[in-house]
Structure formats: C-alpha cells, structure tokens
Image (cartoon, helix red, strand yellow):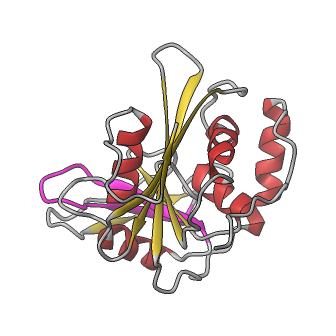
Amino acid sequence: MNKPQIRQLHAWDLSPAEAREVQRRLAPSVSRRDEIGIPRLVAGVDVSYRHLDDTGLAAVVVLEYPTLKTVEVKTRQGKAAFPYIPGLLSYREVPLVLEIWQDLMLKPDLVMVDGQGIAHPRRLGLASHLGLVLDIPTIGCAKSVLCGHHGPVGEEAGSWAELVDKEEVVGAALRTKKRTTPIYVSIGHKVDLPVAIRWTLECCRGYRLPEPTRLAHLASTRRLPEPNGAAAAGA
C-alpha cells in the first residue's frame, strides 16, 4: 500500500513576518474544486497542548467510510517550535502532524482538520496549509470563527449560513446537531464548499463535531481507547 507523501514547500524555521509572506504566496495554490469522489478512508487531525506549555500531542485517526469504524490511530508528543500567534497556527501544528503522518500504514482519501481552511485572513489556515503539504483533499472544521461574519443559522441539523469576509464567502456556519452551537466549515484543499458541507454532515454521528475530528481530539487528549482490529496504534 502506498505510504502518504509529504511535499517540501518551504522551511518551517521562519519569523512571523516570513511565515505570513509564505501564507500569501501559497494561498493561490489552494484548489477550491472538488477532487474527493467517494472516500474509502477519512482521517481526522488535531493537536492538544499541556496547560501553559508548548508541548503538544498530535493525533491522526483514520476511519473507514461509510461505517466510520476506526482503523488506525497514531499520536506523537513533541515541543512546538513556533510560538502561539493567531493566524499562524499551522506553523505550530503542521510540523507535529507531519512527524506522525509519514508513519501511517493507511493513506486517507480525505482529511478533516480541527481548524480553519480558507476562512483565514490570508486564506491559508491550518487545513489549507496541511492540504497543500500533503497534496490531499482537506476540510476545515473549526469550533470558532477566526475571520468573517454570518447571518442566522436555522435550528435544524444541516442548516447553514455563509461565512463572509471582505465580501468573499470563505466558509459556512453549519449546525450539525439540533440546538447545538454551529461549527465553521471551510475549504481546505481540493474541495468546494458545498462538498465540504456535505462530507462534514456525512461524518457526523449525533455529536456537534464530525467523527474524524471528534475522535482525533479524544486521541490528542489521551481519551481514545485503542481500537479493536486497528491497523496500527502508536504514541
């Protein structure tokens, strides 16, 4: 089986000003066209940190579609080399994710990220940056807004409103569960917004967060049991 590949698009040891310039340079390379098809394997990605510490635990959880059965879990703890700066989260978290990505036994067809895609001031949030580096379809599934505004969202699951920043639609406020706060879905890479919304809803199983990112968050906080029959698990 093919191992996941990683593209070397730039150095990671950058100043904040250099990091912002790389975001501006890479943003036009983000594909906003759907290239997903029907995924066989969907991955969730998340990174959690110790309180008042730069030590992060990155997690990648791979699920079969449509059962959403967990088939692979990998985690890796490491020190974030880049400081926490709003809008530059990818420089802090992507290197931690890449350390474990190359060890995956299974190659996902779609990655859902707990973070922004193009719903970002420079249109290159964590999901888009990761998608470009991995050259894989990605969707941003954030729990809060980084930029933009939206109108009212209907109360029923599946209701959504456009998220608009500087007169551009950059994502959607999507209600995934009735009477629950919306999440914020945006294009990561190789997907359009209607398809991103569709697959986010397809991967929900009664919780606010879609299963890939929900389970990745549990894994990144050491609360996800080792799956029975998983292809691999590590820490």
Residue positioned 51% across, 42% down in the render: 234
Residue 42 in percent (x, y) is at 46, 67
In the depicted structure, whether residue 15 falls above or below residue 38:
above
In the depicted structure, whether residue 112 falls above or below residue 11:
below
Direction front: furthest residue: 229
Residue 97 in percent (x, y) is at 62, 45
* Left or right: 231 in relation to 151: right
Residue positioned 31% across, 73% down in the render: 202
* Left or right: 51 in relation to 201: right
Residue 103 in percent (x, y) is at 64, 52
Direction top: furthest residue: 52
User: In which image quadrant can residue 178 be found?
Assistant: bottom left
Q: Nearer the viewer, residue 216 or 173?
A: 216
Q: Which residues are magenta?
A: 167-189
Q: Decide if residue 134 is in sight here.
A: yes
In the depicted structure, whether residue 95 falls above or below residue 1:
above
Residue 168 in percent (x, y) is at 56, 65
Q: Nearer the viewer, residue 47 or 5?
A: 5
Q: Is residue 182 magenta?
A: yes
Residue positioned 74% across, 63% down in the render: 5
Q: Decide if residue 168 is in sight here.
A: no
User: In which image quadrant can residue 13 be found?
Assistant: top right
